[in-house]
Image: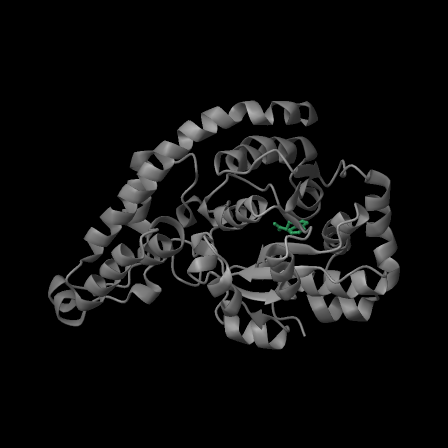
């Protein structure tokens, strides 16, 4: 039964239902065990997994493992994209070999973004920001779906041979009615996920958002039928878009996200104007009843993206709940944090420019 469409998802309302019906296990035991993890793991944005025990064992016993993940280069790089990269850089520090891909084929097939444009976005928006966020070149293989990784021939063959290991009934069960372009994209994604095994690394983890869950099930079924090891996955909740706690940041809707190129004024205006508030309608009511941080986008962003200090976060939460901290004040905290993050990030990005030089030949 199709519960989620990876290409069309606009919001996710019930993560527990998704997890239960699509066979996802609770990640909590691992988020507690992993040391010095990024906020996404520590604070529970990464909510579910499949087969993470293999990865945990590889980390504990210092055995070889690989991370493979990718993003579709569909527009500007925004804070909705950061969670996956923070996880990737964390695993890279733990010794994982990293495979990162730009899904430029998928962007052409499903978003009608031409190859040249998709490559440019992938390099200048995504890759540049990945390096500025701490990704290292060592132990990293980056590729475009349209060009393929090092073992190009095996990779393209896998995406085609995978078609013999499924049928329209199964495809319909997982994805509903999909177009041929989407099916090709799904098979290509399966080849991406299997790829590290072609280079000899059997233990692999693909960190992705819950919107990508159908691809995980499809890839695991096909991988096992082709005689590969079962790839492991973690699934993170989507960082909400500015419009509300269950909405999504979307590159085609500038009022839904804060982009890494937004200037100070734009950040201030967007947060003040659009960030959904869990506060009360009037000052008097707010002081009396308090606000609700659980649905407040500014609080949620502080929790998962910006406030590393647990004590400070807790104080903000309590003050907001009690009504002592007002919506405008909470927004002001977030605005300050985003702008100081971006100021530092811009400097890192200038330094990272040299890292992307060798990729510009693909434009
Ligand atoms: N479908 C993903 C997206 O929409 C991109 C992607 C392609 C991907 N291949 C992948 C993600 C393999 C993880 C693993 O962003």
Relative to 98, 14 lies left or right: left
The answer to whether 216 is drawn above or below residue 363 in the figure is below
Quadrant of the image containing the C terminus: top right
Q: Residue furthest left?
A: 284
Residue 221, picture quadrant: bottom right
Residue 264, picture quadrant: top left
Q: Which residue occupies 43% across, 44% down?
A: 254
Q: Which residue occupies 59% across, 60% down?
A: 234
Relative to 13, 97 lies left or right: right
Where does residue 91 sit, x and y in percent of width and height?
57, 49
**Colouring of the image:** one colour
Where does residue 159 sit, x and y in percent of width and height?
81, 51
The answer to whether 235 is drawn above or below residue 250 in the figure is below
Where does residue 324 sit, x and y in percent of width and height?
14, 62
Q: Which residue occupies 82% across, 39% down?
A: 152
Quadrant of the image containing the N terminus: bottom right
The answer to whether 140 is drawn above or below residue 279 in the figure is above
Q: Residue furthest front?
A: 61
Relative to 231, 315 lies left or right: left
Where does residue 278 sit, x and y in percent of width and height?
28, 63
Q: Is residue 176 visible?
A: no
Residues 102 and 173: in front is 102
How many numbered circles does the render carry?
0
Q: Is residue 284 visible?
A: yes
């Amino acid at each position: 039964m199709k519960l989620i469409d990876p290409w069309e998802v606009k919001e996710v309302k019930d993560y527990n239902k998704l997890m239960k019906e699509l066979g996802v296990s609770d990640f909590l035991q691992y988020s507690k065990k992993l040391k010095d993890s990024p906020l996404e793991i520590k604070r529970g944005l990464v909510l579910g997994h499949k087969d993470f025990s293999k990865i945990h064992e590889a980390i504990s016993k210092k055995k070889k493992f690989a991370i493979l993940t990718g993003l579709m280069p569909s527009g500007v790089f925004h804070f909705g994209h950061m969670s996956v990269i923070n996880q990737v850089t964390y695993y890279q520090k733990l010794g994982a070999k990293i495979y990162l891909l730009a899904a430029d084929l998928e962007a052409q097939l499903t978003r009608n973004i031409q190859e040249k444009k998709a490559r440019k976005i992938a390099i200048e928006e995504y890759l540049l920001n990945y390096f500025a966020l701490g990704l290292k070149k060592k132990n990293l293989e980056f590729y475009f779906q349209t060009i393929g990784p090092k073992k190009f021939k095996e990779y393209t063959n896998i995406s085609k041979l995978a078609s013999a290991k499924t049928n329209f009934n199964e495809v319909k069960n997982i994805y509903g009615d999909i177009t041929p372009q989407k099916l090709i994209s799904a098979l290509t994604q399966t080849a991406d996920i299997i790829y590290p095994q072609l280079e000899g690394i059997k233990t692999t983890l693909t960190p992705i958002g819950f919107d990508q869950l159908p691809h995980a099930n499809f890839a695991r079924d096909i991988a096992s039928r082709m005689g590969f090891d079962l790839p492991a996955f973690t699934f993170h909740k989507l960082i909400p878009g500015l419009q509300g706690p269950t909405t999504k940041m979307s590159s085609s809707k500038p009022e839904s996200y804060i982009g890494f190129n937004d200037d100070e004024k734009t950040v201030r205006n967007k947060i003040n104007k659009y960030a959904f508030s869990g506060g009360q309608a009037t000052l008097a009511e707010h002081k009396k009843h308090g606000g609700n941080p659980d649905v407040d986008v500014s609080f949620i962003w502080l929790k998962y993206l910006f406030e590393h200090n647990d004590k400070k976060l807790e104080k903000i939460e309590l003050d907001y709940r009690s009504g002592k901290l007002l919506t405008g004040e909470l927004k002001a905290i977030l605005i300050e944090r985003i702008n100081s993050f971006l100021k530092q990030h811009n400097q890192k990005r200038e330094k990272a420019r040299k890292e992307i030089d060798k990729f510009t030949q693909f434009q």
